[in-house]
């Protein structure tokens, strides 16, 4: 396509519709302005385009560009006198997003592959049914009936493998006679992406009761996963059915130059684009009020060492880990002690339950005191940690396959299906969501992410301050160059780097590594943290010389030299706390240590 | 005068209440437009497909799934009764016989020659929708349900548990600041909607269940007591399906918080009147709050809902610690962003506290008390 001079992109969220205007100047594509307005899928408007137009009108006012004509239609292409735009794209998560159930034969194999495909397509997976999920048939039927998903993705059986178990699952789904969540006059879309030999049997059961679509097997052989056909079909059906139930989408889809994408799928697309173009391994997280999404791109498994590993994208959504609607659930899942371990104050644990629940029932309130902020950020650490744990469990290699090993590797007791998340190889962590993007001090966001993700070696951290990744993700499908330029220049706020040596053993006070950055050498001391202010240079060299038995990425005792960005708003954090990150059990001792780190990084104002 | 928007909960002595009473699946509407209905009257009815029993016939009969149909004594679509033979096999020239009986009444839905399993659909489950409030049917959606309308006093709570109930209002405390303790719940509270003050204790909830109280309406509850009552910790505020015996509507929040005077007085004004009460809460997009609706006799004028705007002189409640639950008067609504002790710069307001001191706090942390 020809080079667009101006691009309009919107994201219709559950509560807010956000519009951004990207313009091209001599230096390339830049974010010009952004506008927002309440989403209008509910009464009295019941038309999503109203919210889009309102957000676009704000963009018009702020930019001085005319985008809408007198009939409120988007003017395309751009004409003279800053009139119109060349390209318009949109994402959406309004109406609760896409809610799916998946099924497979074996929970850890085909059901897990189906889960990865659905999550990658931007869905919330409400449940995964499998032959070995420990439930009785009638329990599975009751579950399908009570959840009422928007769509079901069925997998199961490698090609030529089991037919009986697949047929049984089809019988169960047929018996449940599932109705779509949003009701109305259409049959529930079901995608079958399993054993080719079971297709007729599945059709026999489900053709009349649902709108059945058959695509290529998600797991044609044990050691091959083929997610794309199922993922593409999920997107297609999302547009055809689910989005059609949301008022105004038909109209909106005629305005856009590319199909409307589910918001999480767009964020995933952007994460993947960044990882592939920069050849880096990335973790992205979006912590919202109700849910936390984690995206990652890591190198996949290879059968032999000479093979170049492919970058593998994964996404998970932790449906009930969030900072307002789900804040109470974080406390339930993490436990009070795990939350309070991050606060340097002596908080009354008994009163904490009431406080957290009051936040849940009045989700729009904000911390007003320092103590309240500390508690909220402690909860955020646990929500992020738990969401990342869930992500690690799903972002794995394929389970159940035989690995070819040489004699040398025969004593290496790694199993197939291990997590792909390797914290030592992780290059970049991107955080977004109110608690990270709007923390009063950027250091707070940086430390929350370091504590929750515990990166190892050298890792860059950044926040997406206005959550522009959805719009850039859908734009990347049409114009990756423009999306990448805006991503690095205007979307990300670089915070800095974390250098965390991993010692086999260390005593407090031991020197773990010498770090030479911008001509100065600093020591990483066990049990301590240090902040080196940024030099402001976009690229600089850092050399980390670890002590004996300490790893910073190249093996124990091996020096690492790397080019890093040193223009973060916080700087480089030298984290000598070791891995895993264990805090003292004794509350007084722990609080003293937390205060020491807080002062070293200037996290909170001194009272 | 400066205005700011903050959503509050509805507490109104007169409103025209409309309740949609819709079936989960299409069915039959039993009333017509203009009918007068009581809250307990059934206005629509449908049948949900029955549960399914799965019998592993091939295994039970010791036969190959492909040969199973020949051994079935019933066909797909046949009605069956519990205990009725549905499959038979014999071996050794009829010497050994084996029979499989239906576990429940129902209909044979499928006989699978692939899995060897038989699906039996139990009889349909009737689902009935009541009017919930005493009132008039003002709209009928054929096969779907109705809208019932009534003039009513109406109170929204902040969180609740348990479903729809009806009962006479019974005020068992002297003031909005009293605690609802078990000794205040006598046998005469059975089937009543009991109103307490600042807190309901765990013991009082237990007592309410024992006595058969329809619902408890109260200012506050400790989260540990709610957990004890539910039997699990409440992670997300999506409630209403619990089967607890006694519905709970909390008007102010978690902890000991005096019920707003206006709410308490309104409930007191209607002591003895029949109230419809629902604990269902959903704090997500499309928010649902628990409620107490008291249908009024005669006519009432529709009161325009407060638009949520806030002005100097308004009474607000502080809804975040410190000072949680305190009522205060708005003295200023500054335009500029103001830094709070967390260092965040926020839209703020200044209020006068009951002790006469002034306090500046985020606008997000107050709610307007409609006067």
Image: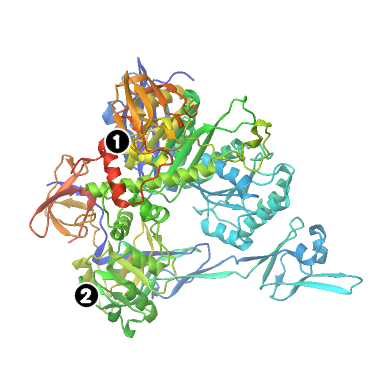
* Chain ID at mark 1: A
User: Which quarter of the picture shows residue A197?
Assistant: top right
Can residue A247 be seen? no
Pick whichever, A347 or B347, lies toward us: A347
Of the 4 image quadrants, the one containing the C terminus of chain A is top left
Residue A339 point in image, percent of width and height: 35, 51
Mark 2–mark 1 contact, CB under 8 Å?
Answer: no
Q: Position of residue B343 (x, y in %)?
A: 21, 40
Where does residue A526 sit, x and y in percent of width and height? 36, 36
Density class for disc 1 (Cα within 10 Å; few <14, some 14-19, many ≥20) is many
The residue singled out by tag 2 in the image is: B269
- Can residue B319 be seen at all in this image of the molecule? yes
Q: Label 2's element? A: helix
On what subunit does the disc labeled 2 rest? Answer: B
Q: CA distance from mark 2 to mark 1?
A: 55 Å
- The residue to which callout 1 is attached is A443
Work out whether residue B194 or residue A1 is closer to the camera in this orientation and state it: B194
């Amino acid at each position: 396509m020809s080079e667009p001079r101006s691009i309009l992109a919107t994201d219709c969220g559950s509560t807010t519709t956000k519009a951004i205007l990207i313009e091209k100047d001599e230096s390339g594509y830049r974010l010009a302005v952004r506008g927002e307005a309440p989403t209008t899928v509910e009464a009295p408007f019941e038309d999503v385009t109203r919210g889009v137009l309102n957000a676009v009108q704000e963009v018009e006012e702020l930019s001085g560009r005319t985008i809408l004509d007198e009939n409120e239609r988007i003017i395309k292409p751009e004409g003279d006198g800053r009139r119109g735009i060349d390209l318009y794209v949109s994402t959406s998560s309004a109406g609760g997003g896409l809610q799916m159930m998946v099924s497979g034969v074996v929970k850890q194999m085909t059901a897990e592959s189906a889960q990865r495909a659905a999550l990658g397509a931007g869905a919330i997976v409400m449940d995964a049914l499998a032959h070995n999920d420990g439930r009785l048939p009638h329990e599975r039927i009751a579950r399908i009936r009570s959840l009422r998903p928007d769509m079901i993705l069925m997998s199961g059986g490698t090609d030529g493998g089991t037919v009986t178990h697949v047929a049984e699952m089809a019988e169960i789904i047929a018996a449940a006679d599932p109705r779509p969540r949003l009701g109305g006059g259409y049959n529930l879309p079901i995608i079958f992406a399993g054993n080719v030999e079971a297709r007729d049997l599945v059709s026999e059961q489900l053709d009349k009761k649902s709108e059945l679509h058959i695509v290529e097997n998600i797991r044609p052989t044990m050691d091959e996963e083929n997610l794309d056909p199922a993922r593409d079909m999920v997107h297609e059906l999302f547009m055809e059915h689910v989005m059609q139930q949301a008022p105004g989408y038909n109209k909106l889809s005629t305005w856009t130059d590319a199909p409307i994408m589910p918001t999480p799928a767009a964020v995933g697309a952007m994460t993947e684009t960044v990882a592939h173009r920069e050849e880096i391994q990335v973790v992205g997280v979006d912590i919202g009020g109700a849910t936390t999404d984690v995206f990652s791109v890591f190198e996949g498994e290879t059968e032999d060492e000479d093979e170049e590993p492919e970058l593998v994208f994964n996404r998970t959504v932790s449906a009930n880990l969030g900072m307002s609607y789900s804040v109470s659930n974080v406390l339930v899942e993490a436990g009070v002690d795990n939350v309070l371990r991050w606060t340097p104050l002596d908080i009354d644990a008994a009163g904490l339950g009431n406080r957290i629940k009051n936040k849940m029932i009045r989700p729009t309130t904000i911390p007003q005191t320092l103590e309240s902020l500390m508690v909220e950020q402690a909860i955020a650490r646990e929500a992020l940690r738990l969401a990342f744990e869930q992500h690690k469990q799903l972002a794995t290699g394929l389970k159940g396959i035989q690995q070819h090993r040489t004699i040398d590797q025969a004593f290496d007791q790694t199993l197939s299906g291990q997590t792909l998340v390797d914290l030592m190889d992780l290059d970049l962590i991107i955080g977004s969501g109110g608690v990270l993007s709007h923390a009063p001090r950027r250091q707070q966001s940086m430390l929350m992410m370091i504590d929750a993700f515990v990166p190892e070696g050298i890792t860059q951290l950044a926040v997406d301050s206005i959550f522009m990744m959805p719009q850039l993700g859908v734009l990347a499908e049409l114009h990756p160059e423009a999306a990448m330029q805006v991503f690095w220049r205007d979307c990300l706020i670089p915070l800095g780097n974390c250098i965390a040596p991993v010692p086999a053993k260390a005593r407090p006070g031991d020197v773990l590594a010498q770090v030479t950055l911008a001509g100065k050498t600093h020591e990483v001391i066990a049990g301590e943290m240090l902040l080196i202010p940024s030099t402001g240079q976009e690229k600089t060299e850092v050399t980390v010389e670890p002590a004996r038995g300490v790893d910073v990425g190249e093996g124990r005792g091996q020096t690492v030299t790397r080019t890093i960005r040193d223009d973060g708003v916080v700087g480089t954090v030298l984290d000598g706390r070791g891995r895993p990150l264990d805090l003292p059990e004794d509350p007084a001792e722990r609080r003293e240590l937390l205060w020491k780190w807080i002062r070293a990084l200037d996290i909170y104002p001194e009272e | 005068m400066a205005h700011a928007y903050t959503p509050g909960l509805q507490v109104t002595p007169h409103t025209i209440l409309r309740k949609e009473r819709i079936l989960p699946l299409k069915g039959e509407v039993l009333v017509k437009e203009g009918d007068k209905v009581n809250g307990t009257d059934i206005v629509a009815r449908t049948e949900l497909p029955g549960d399914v029993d799965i019998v592993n016939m091939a295994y039970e009969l010791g036969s190959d799934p492909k040969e199973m149909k020949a051994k079935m004594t019933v066909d797909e679509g046949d009605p069956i009764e519990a205990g009725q033979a549905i499959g038979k096999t014999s071996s050794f020239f009829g010497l050994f016989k084996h029979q499989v009986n239906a576990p429940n009444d129902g209909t044979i839905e499928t006989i699978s020659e692939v899995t060897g399993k038989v699906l039996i659909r139990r009889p349909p489950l009737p689902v009935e929708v009541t009017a919930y409030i005493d009132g008039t049917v003002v709209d009928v959606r054929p096969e779907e349900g109705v809208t019932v309308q009534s003039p009513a006093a109406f109170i929204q709570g902040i969180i609740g548990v348990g479903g729809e109930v009806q009962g006479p209002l019974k005020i068992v405390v002297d003031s909005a600041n009293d605690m609802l303790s078990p000794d205040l719940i006598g046998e005469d509270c059975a089937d009543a909607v009991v109103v307490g003050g600042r807190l309901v204790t765990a013991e009082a909830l237990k007592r309410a269940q024992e006595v058969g109280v329809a619902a408890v309406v109260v200012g506050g509850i400790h989260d540990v007591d709610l957990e004890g009552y539910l039997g699990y910790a409440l992670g997300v505020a999506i409630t209403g399906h619990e089967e607890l015996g006694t519905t709970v509507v909390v008007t102010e929040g978690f902890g000991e918080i005096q019920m707003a005077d206006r709410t308490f007085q309104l409930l007191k004004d209607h002591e003895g009147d029949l109230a419809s009460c629902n604990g269902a809460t959903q704090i997500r997009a499309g928010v649902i709050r628990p409620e107490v609706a008291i249908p009024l006799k005669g006519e009432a004028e529709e009161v325009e809902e407060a638009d949520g705007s806030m002005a100097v002189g308004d009474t607000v409640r502080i809804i975040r610690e410190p000072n949680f639950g305190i009522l205060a008067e708005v003295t200023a609504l500054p335009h500029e962003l103001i830094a709070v002790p967390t260092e965040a710069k926020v839209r703020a307001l200044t209020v006068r506290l009951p002790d006469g001191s002034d306090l500046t706090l985020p606008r997000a942390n107050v709610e307007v008390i409609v006067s």
